[in-house]
Image: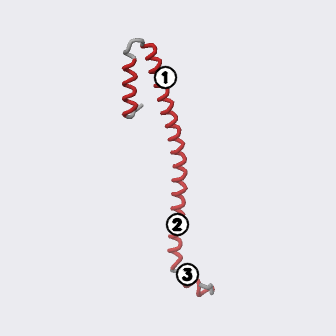
């Protein structure tokens, strides 16, 4: 597990508390705060995973829509040069 700067400083502070007299209270405080940090990290990771799944779905939809648009453009390019002949043969109004 990696810590950012504030978490690293907090962990060093809490470890220093273990060296003080009355270390039972300090030990309990250390583990209480460490559990709190772990709970916050777990919540953050769960939220991030949810966001990743939602973002992946949006990215897939956008990719499919772009692909459809590209295909439509390519089809229109291929049929554009035939349109004049088609109009004259089948008397389609322009």
Label 3 crowd bin: few (<14), some (14–19), many (20+), radius 10 Å: some
Whole-percent x and y of residue 78? Answer: 51, 74
Whole-percent x and y of residue 82? Answer: 54, 80
Q: Quadrant of the N terminus?
A: top left
Q: Secondary structure at mark 3?
A: helix
Vertical side of 59 occupied by 83: above or below: below
Label 1 crowd bin: few (<14), some (14–19), many (20+), radius 10 Å: few
Q: Nearer the viewer, residue 56 or 7?
A: 7
Residue at figure coordinates x 52%, y 45% from the top left: 51
Q: Are the residues tagged 1 and 2 within 8 Å (C-beta)? A: no
Going from the N terminus, do you reach mark 1 or mark 3 first? 1
Residue at figure coordinates x 49%, y 22% from the top left: 32
**Picture disc at residue 4:** none
To which residue does mark 2 refer?
Answer: 71
Going from the N terminus, do you reach mark 1 or mark 2 first? 1
To which residue does mark 1 refer?
Answer: 32
Q: Nearer the viewer, residue 52 or 67?
A: 52
Q: Secondary structure at mark 2?
A: helix
Going from the N terminus, do you reach mark 3 or mark 2 first? 2
> Which quadrant holds residue 14?
top left
Residue at figure coordinates x 43%, y 17% from the top left: 26
Q: Is residue 1 left or right of residue 81?
A: left
> Which quadrant holds residue 13?
top left
Whole-percent x and y of residue 22? Answer: 42, 12
To which residue does mark 3 refer?
Answer: 83
């Amino acid at each position: 597990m990696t810590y950012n700067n504030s978490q690293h400083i907090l962990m060093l502070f809490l470890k220093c508390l273990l060296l003080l007299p009355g270390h039972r209270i300090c030990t309990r405080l250390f583990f209480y705060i460490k559990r709190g940090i772990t709970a916050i990290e777990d919540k953050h990771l769960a939220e991030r995973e949810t966001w990743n799944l939602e973002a992946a779905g949006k990215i897939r939809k956008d990719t499919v829509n772009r692909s459809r648009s590209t295909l439509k453009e390519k089809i229109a390019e291929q049929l554009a040069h035939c349109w004049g002949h088609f109009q004259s043969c089948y008397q389609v109004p322009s």
